Image: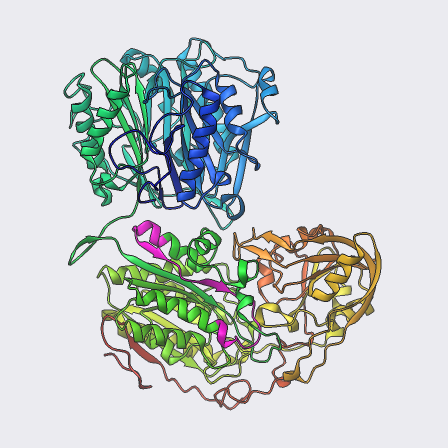
Amino acid sequence: MDMTPPGIWHLPIAHTHHLSASAGVLSFVGGAGDFDAAGRIRNPGNLDKQIEGAMANVAHALASESCKFDDVVRLKAHYTADRDDWEVIAALGRFFMADPMPVISTVPEPLQPFSGQTIQIQVIAQRGWRTHCDVRTVPRPVPPERRALFGDATVTAGLRAGEFIAVANRTAEDADGVLRHPEDGIAQSHFIMERHAETLAALGASFQDSVKMEGYYFGNTREQWAPLAKARASHFREPGPPATVVPCHRLNPNGALTKIEVMAMRELWNGFDKYIPREDHWPKRVWDWTIPLPYRQAIRLRDTIWLGGQVPLCPYSNKGQRVMAGQLLPQARFTMSYVEDLLRPFGRAVADLKLMVCYFTSTGTEAETVAFAKTLADCVSGALPPMTLVPKPMMHSPEATVEILGRGAGLRALGCAKGRISMRFIAAMMKHETNTFSPVPTPLSSFAVGEENDLPAAAARAVEKYADTNTAIAAYIELARREGAELVVPVAGAAAPSGLVADAAFEHFASAICGAVRKGCDALFLDLHGAMVTESHDDGERELLRRVRAIAPKLPIAVALDFHNNLSETMVQNATVIVGYRTYPHVDMRETGVRAGGTLLRAINGEIEPVIVWGRRPMLTHTLKQSPSVQPMKNIMDAAMAAEQNGRVLNASVFGGFPMADIPHVGLFAVIVADRGAAAAAERLRDNLLDEAWRLRADFVFQVEPLASSLNHAKTLEGRPIVLVDHGDNVFSGGTQDVMETVEEAFKAGLSDMAIGPIWDPQTVKELVEAGVGARVTVKLGGKIPMPALGFQGRPLEVSGTVRRITDGRYKITGPMMTGLTVNHGLSAVLDTGAAEILICSERWEPFDLRVFRHAGIEPTAKRYLLIKSRQHFRAGFEPIAKHIVLLSGPGVTSSDYSLFRFGRVPRPLYPLDTTAANPGGARLKPGRRAAAATKDGDAHLA
């Protein structure tokens, strides 16, 4: 929010101020009280009424950040009333209907900043975390004598919303409401920190992940502060988080001497919780503690800067002397200079603060608060950030009058010829692998399954959907956050492989991306497939890049491509960096984005001048023989990876190509990105990779085995589960997922104790839903999609069974491929025939995560046979549990039998369609966009 909306509440101060602001994914609301539009306190002295009014004002402020109550992760209330913490938590908790309740921290205060005020509420929110993030909670039991206040016997002790973790403040009160170690502040500190460590561990984190520690202690002398500080600090290792600890003058229950809370950040990557590196600055001028403590003064993680509490101690010193002792306003100005010092190394200023919390000495008059706010305004250029102002009868000593902490926008200013500015990045995803033989249409809605209005995700929704997933665009999002760039995501969508992409769908993507580029940017980061064919274009990616380049001839462009792309000359000419997946199953999508984005960033910063060396061999390799984890591709890909890892080149990619496309630019490809001075080495590497692939061309041909022979072999195998893989009808190669011949033959072979699916048949799903769970039905399953390109007419299979389960078809991927994405099979049902449980779905998706069955109540490890439609991606989730794997060469538009397909437009000769094809070479060297204009000839060259 840039300004306070007219008619909405505001603080009773004369200076323009924000009520809310955002830094990255986090949104902040300052100290909201029961203020009216004129800044007057309503319901003076009435805590219950003021809680209602303050929460209404919180809702207004959240709306300015496109948030609502359900988006709140952490709420902190400073209250002044003869109540205990549990009563206040219960009163605040009633405003949150969704489970889990956010973390609620409370602090009893003797004073409030404005006359008649009894409470102020500060909030941290994250839009959409309940539906789009990894959510974990740790409950805390409510003491038995307080449970009548709560509809539930627990509150939230700790909450993880994606990467952000909040742990509520607490005293040393145990689960029974008994204060442990009364009047012993050191023992209480250890007790609290041990409980917080347990909570963090349950959330997948530790104290080392902390970004902020906030504490309160009973007292106002160094002798009261230091022993407790050492006790808290003993639970942290260097480097610890920024910290703020201030005196308090009342704690609940009686005998409590300290209260502590923690915030942390930790990422989930490839199914594992990972530490997030942080940037740390401590300018020499800024004061230090008088005792050894592990805390830092300022850190940046992602898009947010976290500041420790700044106090008016002498600069360049750890002696503890105060500057301008006892003078509030001069000390406030001096302390703000420390805040500025800490922000400066991050390229930010005090005007970039998104939340400021200020503790200051006061006798309790409103005039003192107004004068203090004016001093703050004098130190901030422009409007004041959202603020929580907490007056105290005394701070750490009579000489100290103020402590100020804050959260800042973590955007780093990048150097350029015109001064220090933040950059504007565009990131977009347009992904489709087009099987030109597939009868399945590809309208725009195919790219928007599960999205509102049948449109692909864009803007904030795209970031919510793809951030922290195993995708290339997730890496781009993270790169923009890390570099402090403004990020624009005009569109992000992927469709399951199918037939030609509708022109209207392609134009939607192209218009959105080109429109964003026209508005200006410093770099474009694209997450593409590389095998899109539209109704009008043989190469959708080529056409997109051609249009972008026409708008911005010198724009740095990074492109992440699928391993199964069909590269074209124009695509290479119009990119600065091209990098591809190196795994199949594709478990390195995010890593590919990291590689592509990292190289482009180095080019932007002037560290390198990239050129692209690329080439092709006329090979229509079988996808079942392409996996880089086994021969014949393994040694080739290993050589490419080694060249990149040892620094001979910037990036090296080998592409197996996508064979189910009758277009003029299929083949096997190598693309090398090198610094201009290493172009010759890149050419040699390219030739070696391609020549080795050509030498092994016969090994890239898959020998088809009769279906009956494969099933008979499966019957002889022992153990479970035995994974039967129907690769002729694979969704992620464009299959219909409804060819029933393989299922029929499995039944005929007498196989039982099977899980089968998913089978795409929305009509049958509807019939099963109408029949209801428990109904006995007979249906004509699958076989509803004819395949004219193969002269194949689908044939339904009549099956009888009991409807066991009906699901919404949604689950989040937890395996290594596309980790974190939510799959939407649409309305789905399980039909139990006795011999098999068949999962039938309304939306197509390849099964490569075990939750495809588990979400429908089928445990895959308990079945003797798992019959799935896949090629290689199934290995990501199913290979680790498989006792045996048997490939089934069933019919369909993804068959490995090339004799079934009428290739009329592919370049000839082409191996193995033409066994006399020769190695043509034909490699090319393409200059980076910063070095020269795009070339159009077909010769090897270096401009």
What residue span does the magenta drawing correspond to? 479-505
The residue shown at (48%, 28%) is 52
Against 278, residue 941 (above or below) is below
* Color style of the picture: rainbow
Q: Nearer the viewer, residue 886 or 290?
A: 290
- Seen in the picture, residue 629 relative to 146 is either above or below; the reply is below
Task: Specify whether 708 is left or right of 81.
Answer: right
Residue 751: quadrant of the picture: bottom right
Percent position of residue 275, x then y: 41, 42
Total count of labels: 0
**Image location of residue 631, percent across then percent down:** 52, 69
Q: Is residue 514 left or right of residue 716?
A: left
Residue located 50% across and 27% down the image: 92
Q: Quadrant of residue 236?
A: top left
**Is-magenta flag for residue 503?**
yes
Q: Position of residue 382 (x, y in %)?
A: 22, 41
**Residue at 42 percent of width and 74 percent of height:** 541
Query: Residue 709's quadrant in the figure?
Result: bottom right
